[in-house]
Amino acid sequence: MRTIFFILQKEFLQIFRNRSMLPIIFAMPVVQLLVLAFAANYEIKNLSIDVVDHDGGTWSRQLRDKLTASGYFSLYHQSANTAQAMEDLETGGADLILTIPRHFERDLVRENEVRVQLLVNAINGSKAGLAAGYASSIINDFNRRIRLDWLALDEDDAPAHFDVSYRYWYNPDMNYKYFMVPGILVVLVTMIGAFLSGMNIVKEKEMGTIEQLNVTPIRKIHFITGKLLPFWIIALFELAFGLTVGKLVFHLPVVGNIGWVFLFASVYLLVMLGLGLLISTFTDTQQQSMFITWFFLIIFVLMSGLFTPIESMPPWAQKITLFNPVAYFVKVIRMVMLKGSGWADIRYYLGVMLVFAVVLNGIAVWNYRKTV
Amino acid sequence: MNNYSIVTKDLTKRFGSFTATDAITFEVGQGEIFGFLGANGAGKTTAMRMLCGLLKPSSGEAKVAGYDIYTQTEQIKKRIGYMSQKFSLYEDLTVKENIRFYGGIYGLSNQQIKEKTHALLDRLQLEKEARQLVSSLPLGWKQKLSFSIALLHDPSIVFLDEPTGGVDPITRRQFWDLIYESADKGVTIFVTTHYMDEAEYCNRISIMVDGKIKALDTPAGLKKQFNAESMNDVFLQLARAKS
Amino acid sequence: MQQFFVFVRKECYHIFRDKRTLLILFGMPLVLIILFGFAITNEIHHAQIAVLDQSRDSYSQRLVRKMTASRYFEVNRYLSSYKEIGPAFRQGDVKLVVVIPGRFAHSFEHEKVAAVQLLTDASDPNTATTLINYANAMIIQYQQELTGEIKLPLTIRSEIQMVYNPSLKGVFLFVPGVMTLILMLVSAMMTSITITREKELGTMEILLVSPLKPVMIIAGKVVPYIVLSFIISLIILAMGTWVFAMPVKGSLLLLLLECILFGLTALSLGILISSMTNSQQTAMMISLMGLMLPTVLLSGFVFPLESMPKPLQVVANVLPAKWFNIILKDVMLKGAGLRQVWMPTAILCGMTVFFLAVSIRKFKIRLS
């Protein structure tokens, strides 16, 4: 045990003496949180819309006003010129075009049916999907209202139908940042855990000091513990720091017991440290270790449900995420913070993490041969 | 010299089809300064790494400080010191921090570390530099510090792998004074070197060629055996015989 | 000139001998494209739902069956009371709860209206919205099945057309995105590291005393990376067109030239970084934090630029990646020619010249 203490002492001295390390530990989280939380904002509001109104009647104007009053759309151009609108779409000025045909009002009354056209710039697919969804539900709503007005009907006279109502739980204001910030914290903790720990061991190799340590009576396990523990501590500290920043800047809600987050993080970090250790066992330079870690992390993060929901992956990819530690932590931190999940809810995931930790560290330690 | 520090018998290491050390057999007595010479790639480093427990031999036997190098590497590691040709102190730690770290991992108590640090700094006259980063010291000082740290836990054997590479002659002389001082206290010194004048300082020397020990005797004995003026001649004769 | 080629050959050896790095360089675009192309879609698959059916009559059961017959939803559990909804959400997998009140069929037949309540876990607001849209569409479909197509008076039908990208695949967003990312990685990061490595090892000094001019040395180090990045952009383009049927509506020649231009911009950035620092580690950190992260975040590749706050949108203007992304999308998807993309092209050229000028100045100061 005393040996570990001496290694720890040395590691902390080295970490805090490295001038490029301090900004990484203190500045990076803040910058990352602030930039990512604002940048990774899929909250889709203020879509700009071009209305091409060939009719020009009261109803078409009402429809337009209803769209812009919804808060989702802002009017970019209004004209009767299709070519102009297409150009807006092409330059990216407008996200979608609503075309109201000539004799909209007259046909609606006479023919009982009329078509309006929505052209959506679909280069960003998810945004286009939501834009089309919002627009058509607003149009449907408008349709229902004018129908009732015109025919002077009561709701009761309508034919048999389902009355569907919605409730948005846990985040009724649909604040996207509440969703993103906990996820970003996971990325932060992951980077410290996997990147720095791996590089730290490889550095001893690169410098040749590992040779010296290998002839000392240090036990393999003491050495690894001593090398990894500092990053375990730093990463947990980062988590606390990041949560504080999130609380202060974004008024992040914490519905559940924050202790569960830390408990989960402490096991999750063992997995990440194991990954870093494993990578360090088959790389010789910090550059290689960095590249390989980066490669794995980018896959883990993209497949974690952080930016794109796991529900939107095809079944085979959903199966793969079962082996992605980042996905578990992203899920659990959101569960605890936003929904107030407790021990009964997270214990299964915690168990999975423990298995990961044991397996990864087992392989890494087995692979790490003191006698090179 | 009945009390041997190192005993090897037919010690062999093969990497695939390449035999790096080929059945070497020798003994080193307690308190002896044993020189280990050979051209680059002759197998010196491999032999040394096996004795330190860093490499498992392919065949043969060896005992270091009375312990078997197959099964008792942990005991061996407690009783040896090691200083490699690559500089092995942490450049981003201070002199004192390095001493404390190595003392700590060899299991010295805080009291011992304190005393040893004081004695060591005093002997090397490094008190003023104790709080400086190692990276700021000149190479010669680093080497002396490195050697002293290798002796910190009072090992019975010290392995030195080309300890004086790139150091000026005066510092080298001082370095050897440190070696003698330790040998007088009964520490066995096992040293590899390229400098033939250093070879003359050793009690006995072995010369390796192509993984085999081609000669082993005192410097005087070797010169007589090869009918040579200096160690340099001995070495060149052996190296030429090879090609 | 001959000395120059000798030098270029030496650089090529460096690159091609490091198999692990090379593997990652070529493997990364493949993996990224496959991941983006196949694993990240805009459709919902097997979203887990819970059902609280208080009627258990034929209508309610058929409604549930209707929802789960699609591959969009999968019933994770049946609940028996409202109290179980909270725990179901908290457990994590259930994203939508369908609540059907008692006397469902009866209400529908006799009172002409039956309530259905959809509760979603809106901790992810967008998924919640999408799930409700899907569920709603299915409920309406079921309603029409029950009532038969009734022609309502005064019906406005919205006819939705997705332009530029009818299938809604993300390909059109991520192929250009991956391209910028990888070119940044290869050209800027690798170059800065390779030059600083030479400085760190002290071999730069040796090269500088050789008869080659410093400009030639830098050029020699950079040429192999231009080639490498060009090959990689070809691979990405080829995968985009063959695997994902991504169109190249504009001129291919123009597209390739623009790729080379962006490669040059990234290289000049790499040179700039290497002129500022002497250590590989610092170069790596600056490239990673200063180039890769902004490129991913602010170029409009992963996240829509329009929904970012103004300051970030302004910052995005100084990123070469943003302009390259615009060029790629316009040329590939909209068939734009040089006439349409002259402005971003000119901006990239300007940036390249600027970065080179600054780094040459820096190098001169250092060397003298």
Image (tube, coloured by chain):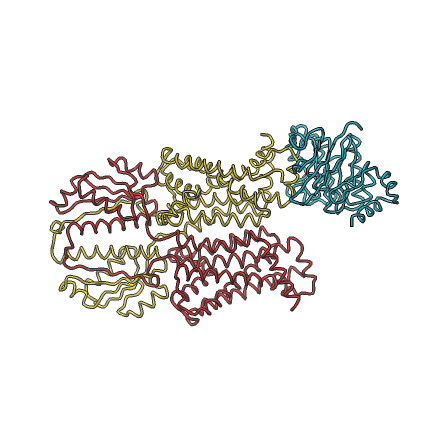
Q: Is residue A327 visible?
A: yes
Q: Is residue A59 left or right of residue C201?
A: left
- Which residue is situated farthest in the front direction here? B17
Residue under the image location 70 percent in, 33 percent down: B61
Q: Is residue C366 left or right of residue A245?
A: right
Q: Is residue C279 left or right of residue C158?
A: right
Residue B147 location, quadrant = top right
Q: Nearer the viewer, residue C133 or C21?
A: C21
Residue A89 is situated, as x and y percent measured from the top left of the image, at 34, 65
Residue under the image location 14 percent in, 45 percent down: C108
Q: Colour of chain C?
A: red
Q: Colour of chain B?
A: cyan
Q: Nearer the viewer, residue C109 or C146?
A: C146
Residue A113 is situated, as x and y percent measured from the top left of the image, at 17, 62
Q: Is residue B100 left or right of residue C108?
A: right
From the image, which quarter does the N terminus of chain B lie in? top right
Residue under the image location 11 percent in, 54 percent down: A153
Q: Nearer the viewer, residue B100 or C193?
A: C193
Q: Nearer the viewer, residue A43 or C90?
A: C90
Residue A10 is situated, as x and y percent measured from the top left of the image, at 61, 37
What is the count of numbered marks? 0
Q: Is residue C172 visible?
A: no
Q: Colour of chain A?
A: yellow
Residue A40 is situated, as x and y percent measured from the top left of the image, at 40, 51
